[in-house]
Image (cartoon, rainbow, N blue to C red):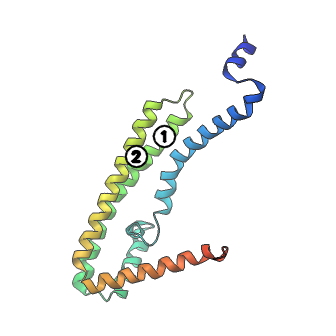
Amino acid sequence: MMSEMKRSIFPARTGAPVFRMLVLGVFAVAAAIVSVPAHAQRHGPGMDSPGMMFGGSSAHMARRIDRMLDRLKASDAQRAQVKQIVQAAMVDLKTQREAARGLREKGLQIFTAPNVDAAAAESLRQQMLAQHDQASRRMLQVMLDVSGVLTPEQRAKFGEQVRQRQQRMQRPADRGTTKP
């Protein structure tokens, strides 16, 4: 019976490597689905994006906001408004991070179950997309609110600082490559 079951589950000897690769591929995809959102939450989308403001501790974030406002020569009124906007967003995004953590745990349960439920996995994927969309909308609102506080000149200066940082961040990656 066991040998019959093995034959029905596993293909003939010549196709076994293909089957093993398929199984490994399925597990790799499942692991990626579970781990990518966790990696993104831990490391953020990058220092040149709006998400840069919300990584780390509150004190660390406050120092980064202060440095940004110093470089932009923000007035006291602008500082107060920007800090209020960011504080409110931090509260909202903390709640969203906790929800994302719950979804990642649910994903781990789905993909480690004896039988993986494709419908549950798809439902989880949709929930993750909705959660990411909600966080993205909140970040856009922060950007719009802060842009309403800053002058056009300050926004232009901020944009130039972001471009310079992007260039500095890309230099290490370019060192190992040769340009034609």
Q: Which x, y percent locates residue 169?
A: 53, 76
Q: Which residue is mark 1?
A: 107
- Residue at the image point whose x is 26% and y is 64% from the top: 141
As measured in the structure, the alpha-carbon distance from the residue carrying label 2 to the one carrying label 1 is: 10 Å
Indicate whether 99 appears above or below 7.
below
Amino acid found under the numbered disc labelled 1:
Gly
Examine the image and state in which quarter residue 153 appears.
bottom left
Residue annotated with mark 2: 128
Where does the N terminus fall, quadrant-wise?
Answer: top right
**For mark 2, does the 10 Å Cα neighbourhood hold few (<14), some (14 to 19), or many (20 or more) residues?**
some
At 24% from the left and 82% from the top, the residue drawn is 78
Q: Residue at x 72, y 19 (%)?
A: 6
Residue 146 in percent (x, y) is at 27, 74
Q: Earlier in the sequence, mark 2 or mark 1?
A: 1
Residue 37, percent from left and from top:
47, 52
Give the amino acid at mark 2: Met
x, y percent for residue 175: 65, 77
Residues 5 and 67: in front is 5
Marks 2,1: beta carbons within 8 A: yes
